[in-house]
Image (cartoon, rainbow, N blue to C red):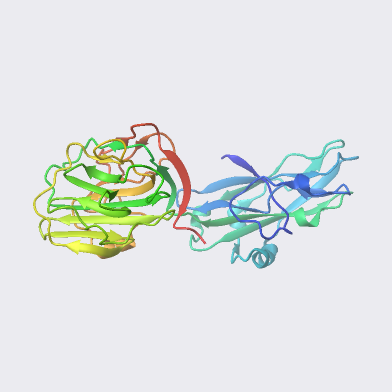
Amino acid sequence: MKFYKYYFLSLAFVTVAMTGCKEADIDNEHHYDNKLYISSQPICDDLLIKESITEASRSIAYRIASPAEEDIQIDFEAAPAMTASYNLIYGDNATALAADYYDIPKKTATIKTGDISSDDIVVNFKNTNELDDSKRYVLPVTITGASKMAVLGSHRTAYFVFKGAALINVVANIKKLYFPIKWKSNVSSMSTITIEALLRSDDWVAGRDNALSSVFGIEGSFLVRVGDGDRPRDQVQVVAPGGNFPEANAVPGLPVNEWVHIAIVYDATTGERIFYKDGVRVYGDEAASGKVSLTSGCNIGKSYNEERWLPGDIAEVRIWNVQRTAEQIAKNPYKVSPDSEGLVAYWKFNEGTGGTIRDHTGHGNDITAVGGDPKWINVEIPAQK
């Protein structure tokens, strides 16, 4: 298990954002008396309730303002009774973490004469995958006493917060990159296709010369893209048999600096061509005509040339050989089962390192970036409360 040191700010600063564990700017405070204090931020909230995570360890750092004139013994203890006061101060609704889920192997420490600190206090968490991921839990750990040394009240307690893991924690920024697809699956004669992708951009409308952003497909054959010379740069356009759709200015543009889920259905068996935005049908016609082949020249993030890259982040790209229903699309923007019926390829773009993206279906349609590795972005989708 890895040990992480987390630094805590004063409880007096109740406006501090609960965004993980960061180093405190303790030097800006003035301690005129030599007092003991936790030299860390009061809230560590990066502990996740997730099926694959059964244990974790965190540590508490502490110190005194000036070197000790004699040995100082310090006592620490879990303080579940402080949960109510934590909720009141921070506006949370957390439940006290039960003793079954943690252990503090050493609750005493000694700062030796001439020192200002000693070894950290380690808190081990266990069986956390058994917690209810719809709830938040908190473990307060506090200094209960110190020999011959006063304790700074506002830096006395550390709070460890558990919350349900987001469905998506890492995404890829693929600006100026693209991914050629060397298919292992048979995509040579598809009567029905559903394409899904989760996108976020800060410059659909401005910020570069090219008016077209490529999502997925083949230039001149079957292509999902955003913008073009005849329409706003933030409007989805699909090149497909039956003509490009939707028409210019026929549908709302994609947002800026927000995640948006898009889904395209092409079904030659019914004639339907449909565009869903965030699970809502915003366009449909019955102009589908003929089968589609994705075998050669298919890319993510490129069409025609390398200047038509996707200006932003991408996740959850899925290719289906069935028509996904409106209900299926609306209910599953962030995750689907890799063995879902009709799922041909599933690129989550959540590797967090490198340039190769795994096909989660097991069909072997892994892809590798051209132009460098993606910039990996930590996210919380959907945002956890």
Q: Is residue 123 left or right of residue 73?
A: left
**Among all residues in the image, which is located at the extreme top?**
371
Q: Position of residue 67 (x, y in %)?
A: 86, 39
| Residue 127 visible (yes or no) | no
Q: Is residue 153 left or right of residue 283?
A: right
What residue appears at the point 64 percent right and 66 percent down from the top-left corner?
A: 87
Q: Is residue 158 left or right of residue 260?
A: right
Q: Position of residue 328 (x, y in %)?
A: 28, 62
What residue appears at the point 70 percent right and 63 percent down from the top-left corner?
A: 82
Q: Nearer the viewer, residue 59 or 328?
A: 328
| Residue 29 visible (yes or no) | yes
Q: Nearer the viewer, residue 82 or 270?
A: 270
Indicate the quadrant where residue 255 lies.
bottom left
Q: Position of residue 174 (x, y in %)?
A: 38, 40
Q: Is residue 32 left or right of residue 314?
A: right
Q: Nearer the viewer, residue 248 or 258?
A: 248
Q: Nearer the viewer, residue 366 or 135?
A: 366
Q: Position of residue 262 (x, y in %)?
A: 31, 56
Give the total of numbered labels: 0
For the N terminus, the quadrant is top right
Instruction: Relative to 194, say whether 326 is above or below.
Output: below
Instruction: Relative to 270, say whether 175 is above or below.
Output: above
Instruction: Relative to 188, say whether 130 is above or below.
Output: below
Indicate the quadrant where residue 275 lies.
bottom left
